[in-house]
Image (tube, grey):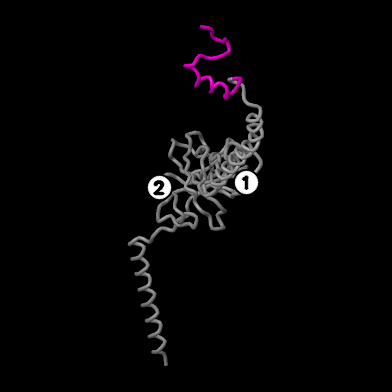
Amino acid sequence: MHVSPNKPAAGNAGFASQLAVGHPWPGVPEPERSARRRSASPKLVQKTILALSVALAAATASAQGLVNFANTPTTLVSVVNTITGTSPPISGGIGSYYFGLCSGTPSNNPVFTGLYATNTGVDGMFNGGTAQVQSAPVGTVQTFFVVGWSANLGETFQRGWLLGNFNGVYGFFGESASTTGVVGDGISIPPLNIFGSGGNSITTGFLLGQDFLIPEPSSAALAILGATMVVIFRRRRKLKAGTLMQP
């Protein structure tokens, strides 16, 4: 039986028809299809970049800014020594003093940010780390100041302390100067340094003084005051009676 070398056998007729209409060079893209793909690629890349840019902008806008909540060796915190009259740097173990970060200024409706720090055990130093401020979106200009107090006043900041109300507890309290700057994300914008040697940072330390509380009057003091008022009242009655008896 003679079979043409270029003619498939009868049993492979279907397969031969597929080969006849298929791609002549497997693995090599068709010119028209390749061209269509190449023309669509730049648009796809542009859309992808645009989508990523929008997502990044939204994430940045909703993110909260970072601050470095710590002082430096040139901005030490001091405390009044009521015995010697001097003001040495704070000392003692970690947790002897507490610090809080407030937004705004002490005289203009300040708001506590919720960020705390403690003394480090190194005289004059405190550290709250790099922290996120919930009320300060990344890239915005914010104003901050720091308050500090002795541990015997308690671990939790009380807004009344800014008004001089210490609820009858004797302790030490103080406020730093203010700083205004841009809070960052730690990537494109660095965190704002609350204390430092330049820029928008606070460049001086601050003092914790006596809280100057007005103690509640004791029972003995009230008794003395009452007795004094009685004496004054009786003397006035005697003087008035003597004046009426004169001719």
Q: Residues within 10 Å of mark 1 (few under 14, many from 20)?
A: some
In the rendered image, residue 18 lying in the magenta stretch gets the answer yes
Mark with earlier residue (1, 2):
2
In the rendered image, residue 189 lying in the magenta stretch gets the answer no
Residue furthest top as drawn: 1
Give the x, y percent position of residue 190: 60, 38
Give the x, y percent position of residue 15: 50, 20
Where, quadrant-wise, is the C terminus in this rendering? Answer: bottom left
Residue 109 bears which disc, if any? none
Q: Amino acid at mark 2?
A: Gly
**Which of the two residues, 65 or 38, is positioned nearer the viewer here?**
38
Q: Disc 1 designates what residue?
A: 181
Give the x, y percent position of residue 34: 64, 29
Quadrant position of residue 39:
top right
Q: Disc 2 designates what residue?
A: 154
Counting every numbered tag in the picture gives 2
- Left or right, 247 with respect to 34, comes to left
Q: Is residue 17 above or below residue 111?
A: above
Q: Mark 1, mark 2: which one is toward the viewer?
A: 1
Q: Residues within 10 Å of mark 2 (few under 14, many from 20)?
A: few
Q: Amino acid at mark 1?
A: Gly
Quadrant position of residue 38:
top right
First to last magenta residue range? 1-25
Residue furthest front as drawn: 1
Give the Cα distance between marks 1 and 2: 30 Å
Give the x, y percent position of residue 116: 47, 43
Callout 2: helix, strand or loop? loop
